[in-house]
Amino acid sequence: MSGHSKWATTKHKKAVIDAKRAKSFAKLIKNIEVAARMGGPDLAGNPALELAVTKAKKTSVPNDNIDRAIKRGAGLTGESVDYTEITYEARGPQGSALLIECLTDNKNRAASEVRLAISRNGGTIADPGSVSYLFTRKGVVNLPKNGLSEDDVLMAVLEAGAEEVKDDGDNWQILSEPGDLQAIRDALNDASIEYDTDEAEFVPSMEVQLDVDAAKKFLKLVDALEDLDDVQNVYTNADMTEEVQAALEAE
């Protein structure tokens, strides 16, 4: 039985990873379509498109999918691509706050699905502005430590506009103004420092520590939201101690 259970667990984990990869591909493709629609299909003359394509390639989105997305977004296939950006605000367990970014071709569908996911999973929709003031838009770059000290990273990115380098366990996290992200990327590349992710994100000004029960409910809520096709990003001020994470993993 133990062998069977191990196989079942492995299979389940693989299914989750594959599902998340497929969802990630869909989000990246949408970003390419929007960038191509806004600035045309030429990467050299469209920095937003070049960035969207670079991110997609970094996540191993097939080149054929990328090329089709560029053509579709630029209107070269006869298909119409018209997405609207919407941000919803919500409250989760223990007073945690969530910002939910959507990119949708159907605002009514997005609103209905987001509200349903929140209400069915222990959250409540918040009034506009009642949650967003807790967050600030920042450029965020995450990179593995790989023997790098905080000073090593600071030396590489300080003149590029980095505001702070934070210790995030196995990673360093660089914070900057969103407009300085490209300079940060260039500085890291010049210093031959590899990074995992680089995004403009909403960073919370204060964090809310969740207990085990609240953390379970919170993770269920976030999973339900991230499973929605129209949801691009979910930002939150919720956090968990190492003890709470260990308790969740032990179950």
Image (cartoon, rainbow, N blue to C red):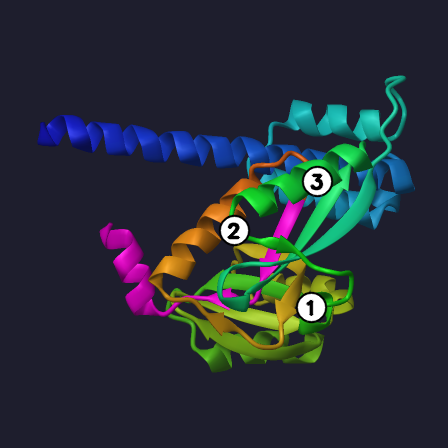
Q: Is residue 44 above or below residue 130?
A: above
Q: Residue 1, position in %: x, y?
A: 9, 27
Q: Which mark is residue 122?
A: 2
Q: Which mark is residue 148?
A: none
In this view, the mark in front (3 or 2):
2
- Compute the Cα span from label 1 to label 2: 28 Å
Foreground residue among 221 and 62: 221
In this view, the mark in front (3 or 1):
1
Foreground residue among 73 and 131: 131
Q: Amino acid at mark 1?
A: Lys
User: How many marks do you count on the picture?
Assistant: 3
Residue 241 covered by magenta stretch: yes
Q: Which residues are magenta?
A: 232-251
User: Considering only order in the chain, which callout, 2 or 1, is on the residue closer to the N terminus?
Assistant: 2
User: Considering only order in the chain, which callout, 1 or 3, is on the residue closer to the N terminus?
Assistant: 3
Q: Residue 176, position in %: x, y?
A: 68, 73
Residue named by callout 1: 138
Is residue 192 left or right of 76 when viewed as pictured?
left
Residue 247 covered by magenta stretch: yes
- Compute the Cα span from label 3 to label 2: 37 Å
Label 3: which secondary element: helix
Residue named by callout 3: 53
Label 2: which secondary element: loop
